[in-house]
Image (cartoon, helix red, strand yellow):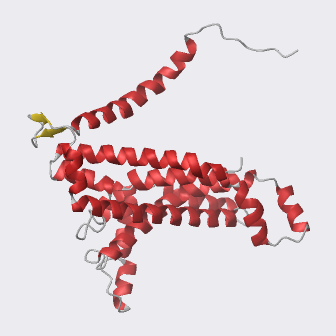
Amino acid sequence: MHRRVIFRGKLLPYLLLLPQLIVTTVFFFWPAGQAIYQSTLLQDPFGLNSRFVWLENFTAVFENPLYLNAVANTVVFSLSVTIMSMTAALGLAVLADRPIRFALAYKTLLIWPYAVAPAVAALLWLFVFHPSVGIIGQALRHAGVAWDYKLNGGQAMGLIIFAAAWKQVSYNFLFFLAGLQAIPKSVIEAASIDGAGAARRFWTIVFPLLSPTTFFLLVVNIVYAFFDTFGIIHALTAGGPGKSTETLIYKVYVDGVVNLDLGGSAAESVILMIVVIGLTAIQFRYVERRVQY
């Protein structure tokens, strides 16, 4: 006979949930509601006078060619950061999962970059790739390469992609390594005895068993690329040169804080929220079907 614990206090579950509900309401639902409300208003730069304009702000956003340029930049940036950070993290996790000397030290060093703030990470890469004072930047110019990310939009986009991916590799590495260590070694050893090579074992056994971790990181990395890279872009390029690195999250800042277009900025933030929620829903609807739990 199994003994079951029954809590007779019906109020206890709600009290335990209350702190999280308060945090979610204050820091998500209330700001999201305010953004939706402000997106329907036409306000002066100081927010003193406002006029209800329905969906005019959304219409103006979609008719703005600079916004469409930010959409294209965001697609390129997000896909590149996600693919680069996850691929590098998976490779490092596979190498770190092997029995090597000083493995603990290697794993600790690989985790450290995640503790660096985005703006600080951007400054680190600025000192490395700056065309005048950066070590690699100066080396490239001495080698005859016309390196100047302050003037070349393609170079600027490549630099912020590299910096943002480097910042996220540590996070992905932790989860991939945990996933690899959770795979039963007996399964891999059995495949090895059957004659399967290292590459075949990885693609037919290891990688399918990592699919839940990969799916989780795919969702997290796309959200990271959309929202959490503002500090990197602001510190490295400030959206330049010529709007070539201005993503959707950075354009919300530019229109709202710099240009003082409060209604347009709110409309852009609402669109960005809907896009990210939609992408996450699509991933759970279609991509998760290929996940093997």
Judge whether residue 246 can be spotted in this image.
no
Left or right: 190, with 4 as reference point: right
Left or right: 41, with 219 as reference point: left
Judge whether residue 292 can be spotted in this image.
yes
State whether residue 257 is above or below residue 143: above
Question: Residue shown at 38%/34% (left/top)?
Answer: 28
State whether residue 61 is above or below residue 126: above
Question: Residue shown at 81%/14% (left/top)?
Answer: 3
| Relative image position of residue 174 (x, y in whole percent) | 61, 54
State whether residue 29 is above or below residue 247: above
Q: Total label count?
A: 0
Furthest-bottom residue in this view: 144
| Relative image position of residue 259 (x, y in whole percent) | 15, 52
Residue in front for this viewpoint, 292 or 232:
292
Q: Quadrant of residue 52?
A: top left
Question: Residue shown at 33%/82% (left/top)?
Answer: 147
| Relative image position of residue 163 (x, y in whole percent) | 42, 65
Question: Residue shown at 88%/71% (left/top)?
Answer: 195
Residue in front for this viewpoint, 32 or 188:
32
Left or right: 83, with 256 as reference point: right
Left or right: 147, with 291 as reference point: left
Residue in front for this viewpoint, 28 or 148:
28
| Relative image position of residue 143 (x, y in whole percent) | 38, 91
Residue in front for this viewpoint, 166 or 240:
240
| The N terminus: image quadrant | top right
